[in-house]
Amino acid sequence: MPEIADKGVELDALAKMSPERQAAVVAIVAGGDAPSIRTAVAFTPRTDEAEAAVKKEPKPTPPSTVPPPGPTAAQKWARCLADLMSRDELDRVLAAADQSGSAAGH
């Protein structure tokens, strides 16, 4: 293309680009969408800038594969005692715990 090959500034602009970007920019000029290489540059994204932007984006954290924690030893003992006690016994123990807790708070 003489409009590119005969102008040093156009060739200099092309020389600074990657081969893939050169092809994209020349295609824009050849298709008549831009009058010069320097004008066509505005129509094509720079892949190195796009790749750098992607690298800067934080990567999403994958969901944890660690199972949720199970019941603590105290919770297991409480469940075992609750299963062994009748409802009346359980109510009496809870009431005593409430009374001793409120007495300690005063």
Image: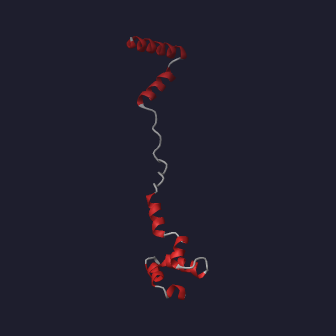
Q: Position of residue 102 (x, y in %)?
A: 42, 13
Compared with residue 45, is residue 12 higher up or lower down, i.e. above or below? below
Determine the residue positioned at 53% across, 75% down: 39
Residue 51 relative to residue 104: left or right: right
Question: In terms of depth relative to the viewer, which is nearer, 36 or 65?
Answer: 36
In this picture the colour scheme is: secondary structure
| Quarter that holds the N terminus | bottom right
Q: Splitting the image into 4 quarters, where does residue 26 fall?
A: bottom right
Q: Nearer the viewer, residue 23 or 97?
A: 23
Identify whether 84 is placed above or below 64.
above
The image shows a total of numbered marks equal to: 0
Identity of the residue furthest to the right in this view: 32
Residue 55 found in image quarter = bottom left
| Residue in the picture at 41% in, 30% down | 73
Q: Residue at x 58, y 77 (%)?
A: 34
Residue 106 is situated, as x and y percent measured from the top left of the image, at 38, 11
For the residue pair 61 and 41, the one nearer the viewer reads as 41
Residue 42 pos. (x, y %): 53, 71
Measured as percent of width and height from the top left, residue 29 is found at 57, 80
